[in-house]
């Protein structure tokens, strides 16, 4: 067997790893507006992108413009991204809805900080979980990913781009300040070691092409603007040609398809890490930097003879329901620690439906959730 | 005779798979602006595939749906930000934005001044009808002081925005104003605007009789066109007039003609330098 080529190791910040992942995934457009604690993503992009052929970096006048520019670039055929934090994320949400409706793939990184409002700018929090799920008007599907360490920041950014392209949808990468500002050794994957997915482009002649036509996967091919396929893109509810419609049958068809194209691929989209869950009687469900504390707590609990396990959520939405259900078959207690008032425990309770007892640990003081806090709750049973 | 050939040109650019009728009221000037835009593009022989029309929201926002270019109907006020992304991603495209006065000056005011400052190579058409038409006639930043709308039934108190002065102050490369009464003039400035590098802005004054005229003493849409005929005078003549003569008059024509390099051109030139240096260093 040929020896695997040694991977390049770097000592990187979480935010830096996001940039590395984006570039490996083929990102060639960044438009943004600076905001703590996501700023390093923008600063490093500003250095890197102009050095790459066709790489575009642009600082816009605000977050609203950033989203607009990123969607525009995406429609012109680029893999595009922006990064922000809570207040900026709020501003982006009208155009986020547009991206969902127009089916423009893009990646939006939100490094969460304490809120509401300007809140705790440099403190960790996980207060935007439900904002990421529901943060635009109307009924819409969304993919929200997360990362709990620097290596995952890189890996999940690549995954975010792949999912965006695969499903023609904006993907939100939800990080917290601890993950973004932790510096760790990570490995850069060699070429060919990771999947890079690009959106499908139409193969039919332009006069046959319908931009929002039904397909087997529910995802219509998407040509770049200016490539000979002329069509109309709108945020209004539209028919298969992209023209505005209010006819109920066409409205339902569109809404069904944009939901279905995400929902039916749950096995591809819902990513988790299961740590010692095979025989667990008590299971911690955590995400982001809290999952690291939880992992240590689970190890300590095991050392004390308690059958604890950890379900680490790497996909937050669509909520990894089937993984949770599998655990509910054996666990008597679920523990959901998070740095908010209980935004993810709502999802857990929804899936649980009274099977197990759900215990929550909530911190909203801008401090991390420590392993000992989680351990204490596990040991209480 | 010329109108017949004019229509033939326009028919080539309309979407045949789009179900008409359109949303515009009888007497609206928006169709005239769209006609001048089509003729300008036709006269410049730009292929349809190389044109991207990015529109905002409102009556003017709906224009994009009728023409056979690459068309994007964006969110309210954000047409220029979408256009910036498209132009940066593919600088070969001719990116034209269509915005209303509320769209461009109110909600999109920040994008307008920064697009002008940045000098991004986009042509911005501002269709100014002094009102929010599609939402039912509320006042816009371009509603003249003293006039009545749904949201200022006792008369507009504040001064209206001068689009030309705003764009000039923000640093646009090319700034011009025309009206739908002076169609040939509008067509020539639009042609100039599309050709120029950097950010160009054309303000087209287009009457809204339904929402503005009826509440402001213009009995018919014809009265509104008469008002345009009377008010608008060439900027060259306007500049020679005294303060008193200028009252109630609106200059039209070209106000700013500069040749600054567009932002996207500058950016790609910088990038080419990097890549050249890297290629040398690598050898």
Image (tube, rainbow, N blue to C red):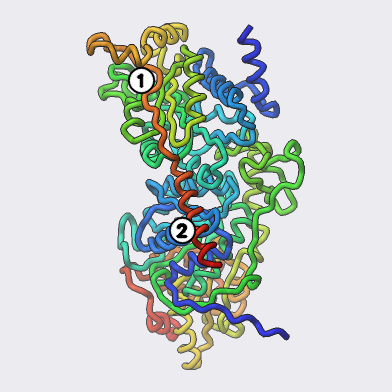
Numbered circles on residues, count = 2
**Few, some or many residues within 10 Å of mark 2 (<14, 14–19, 20+):** some
**Image height check: is B260 above or below A92?**
above
Q: Nearer the viewer, residue A154 or B264?
A: B264
Say which of marks 2 and 1 sits in front.
1
Q: Are marks 2 and 1 in contact (CB under 8 Å)?
A: no
Label 2 vs label 1: CA separation?
40 Å
Quadrant of the rendered structure where residue B43 is? top right
Q: Going 51% across and 79% down the picture, which residue do you hit?
A: A9
Residue A349 shows in the view: no
Q: Chain of mark 1?
A: B
Provide residue B196's location: percent of width, then percent of height: 48, 31
**Image height check: is A296 above or below A18?**
below
Quadrant of the rendered structure where residue A37 is? bottom left
- Helix, strand or loop at label 2? It is helix
Provide residue B274's location: percent of width, then percent of height: 48, 58
Provide residue A150's location: percent of width, then percent of height: 47, 73
Provide residue A29's location: percent of width, then percent of height: 51, 54
**Few, some or many residues within 10 Å of mark 1 (<14, 14–19, 20+):** many
Q: Chain of mark 2?
A: A
- Helix, strand or loop at label 1? It is loop
Are the residues flagged by discs 2 and 1 from a single subunit?
A: no
**Image height check: is A354 above or below B197?**
below
Q: Going 36% across and 37% down the picture, which residue do you hit?
A: B113
Residue on which the image places disc 2? A130
Q: Nearer the viewer, residue A365 or B168?
A: B168
**Image height check: is A32 above or below B152?**
below
Q: Going 51% across and 30% down the picture, which residue do you hit?
A: B195
Numbered circle sitting on residue B149: 1
Residue B186 shows in the view: yes
């Amino acid at each position: 067997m040929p020896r695997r080529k040694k991977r390049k190791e770097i000592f990187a910040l979480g935010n830096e790893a996001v940039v590395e992942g984006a570039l490996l995934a083929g990102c060639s457009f960044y438009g943004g507006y600076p905001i703590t604690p996501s700023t390093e993503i923008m600063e490093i992009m500003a250095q890197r992108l102009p050095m790459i052929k066709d790489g575009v970096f642009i600082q816009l006048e605000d977050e609203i413009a950033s989203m607009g520019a990123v969607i525009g670039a995406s429609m012109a055929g680029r893999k595009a991204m922006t990064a922000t934090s809570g207040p900026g994320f709020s501003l982006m949400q009208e155009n986020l809805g547009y991206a969902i409706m127009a089916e423009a793939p893009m990646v939006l990184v939100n490094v969460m900080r304490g809120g509401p409002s300007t809140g705790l700018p440099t403190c960790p929090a996980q207060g935007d979980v439900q904002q990421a799920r529901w943060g635009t008007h109307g009924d819409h599907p969304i993919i929200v990913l997360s990362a709990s360490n620097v290596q995952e920041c890189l890996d999940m950014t690549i995954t975010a781009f792949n999912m965006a392209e695969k499903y023609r949808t904006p993907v939100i990468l939800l990080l917290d300040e601890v993950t973004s500002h932790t510096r760790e050794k990570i490995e850069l994957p060699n070429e060919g070691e990771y999947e890079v997915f690009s959106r499908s482009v139409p193969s039919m002649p332009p006069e046959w092409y319908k931009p929002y036509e039904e397909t087997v996967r529910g995802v219509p091919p998407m040509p770049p603007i200016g490539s000979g396929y002329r069509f109309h893109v709108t945020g209004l509810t539209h028919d298969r040609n992209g023209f505005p419609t209010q006819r109920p049958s066409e409205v339902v068809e569109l809404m069904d398809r944009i939901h279905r194209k995400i929902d039916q691929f749950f096995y591809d989209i819902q990513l988790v890490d299961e740590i010692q869950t095979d025989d667990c009687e008590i299971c911690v469900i955590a995400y982001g930097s809290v999952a690291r504390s939880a992992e240590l707590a689970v190890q300590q609990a095991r050392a004390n003879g308690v059958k604890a396990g950890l379900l680490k959520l790497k996909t937050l939405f669509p909520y990894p329901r089937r993984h949770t259900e599998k655990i509910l078959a054996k666990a008597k207690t679920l523990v959901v620690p998070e740095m908010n008032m209980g935004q993810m425990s709502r999802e857990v309770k929804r899936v649980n439906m009274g099977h197990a007892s759900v215990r929550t640990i909530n911190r909203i003081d801008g401090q991390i959730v420590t392993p000992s806090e989680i351990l204490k709750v596990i040991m209480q049973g | 005779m010329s109108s017949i050939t004019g229509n033939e040109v326009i028919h080539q650019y309309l979407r045949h798979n789009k179900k008409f009728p359109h949303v515009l009221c009888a007497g609206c000037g928006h169709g005239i602006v769209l006609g001048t835009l089509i003729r300008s593009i036709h006269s410049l022989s730009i292929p349809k595939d190389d044109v991207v029309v990015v529109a905002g929201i409102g009556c003017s926002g709906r224009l994009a749906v009728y023409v056979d270019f690459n068309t994007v109907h964006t969110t309210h006020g954000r047409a220029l930000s979408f256009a910036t992304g498209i132009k940066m991603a593919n600088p070969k495209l001719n990116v034209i934005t269509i915005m209303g006065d509320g769209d461009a000056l109110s909600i999109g005011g920040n994008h307008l001044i920064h697009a002008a400052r940045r000098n991004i190579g986009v042509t911005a058409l501002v269709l100014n009808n002094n009102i929010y038409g599609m939402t039912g006639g509320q006042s816009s930043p371009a509603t003249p002081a003293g006039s009545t709308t749904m949201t200022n039934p006792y008369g507009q108190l504040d001064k209206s925005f001068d689009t030309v002065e705003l764009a000039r102050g923000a640093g646009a490369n090319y700034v011009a104003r025309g009206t739908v009464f002076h169609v040939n003039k509008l067509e020539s400035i639009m042609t100039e605007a599309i050709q120029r590098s950097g950010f160009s802005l054309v303000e087209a004054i287009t009457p809204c009789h339904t929402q503005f005229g009826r509440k402001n003493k213009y009995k018919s849409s014809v009265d509104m066109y008469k008002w345009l005929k009377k008010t608008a005078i060439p900027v060259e003549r306007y500049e020679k007039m005294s303060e008193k003569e200028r009252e109630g008059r609106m200059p039209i024509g070209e106000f700013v003609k500069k040749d600054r390099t567009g932002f996207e051109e500058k950016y790609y030139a910088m990038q080419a330098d990097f890549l050249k240096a890297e290629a040398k260093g690598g050898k």
